[in-house]
Image (tube, rainbow, N blue to C red):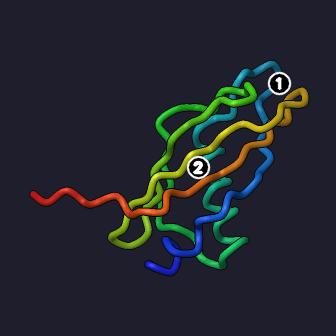
Amino acid sequence: MRVLAAAVLAAFVVLGTAGCGAASVPKEQVAQQISDQLNQQIGQRPDSVTCPEDLPATVGATVRCTLKAGTDSLGVVAKVSSVDGSNVKYDIQVDQNVTPTPTP
């Protein structure tokens, strides 16, 4: 899965939807869109993406997620770039360095 790690240095822009009257994009939706964007951009879907919390629908807000690809883990930051009603655009930036897996 090193190909995935090497290929995700670019930032991607995605469009999320905050529910009617909601002030955030659900963490599950952020994780799914990160996975979808990586699959679309580099032709490879990570094994999993998890986000610890929802992404606030506020310009500049961020959430740091974890991407797993094989034995590698990478951090992924989703940062809100614009909000128009319930439409939230955010950039995705994947860390350049693999997060070391703790040894028992």
Check residue 66 in the rendering and tell me which mark sits there, or answer none: none
Q: Using the rendered view, name the quadrant where residue 87 is placed.
A: top right
Q: Which residue is mark 2?
A: 31
Q: What residue appears at the point 81 percent right and 19 percent down from the top-left corner?
A: 21
Q: Secondary structure at mark 1?
A: loop
Residue at the right extreme of this rendering: 84
Tell me the kind of residue under disc 2.
Ala
Q: Position of residue 35 (x, y in %)?
A: 61, 61
Dot 2 or dot 1: first in sequence order is 1
Quadrant where the C terminus sits is bottom left
Q: Which residue is mark 1?
A: 20
| Residue 8, above or below 63 | below
Q: Secondary structure at mark 2?
A: helix
Q: What residue appears at the point 48 percent right and 62 percent down from the top-left corner?
A: 96
Residue at the left extreme of this rendering: 104
Q: Nearer the viewer, residue 95 or 85?
A: 95
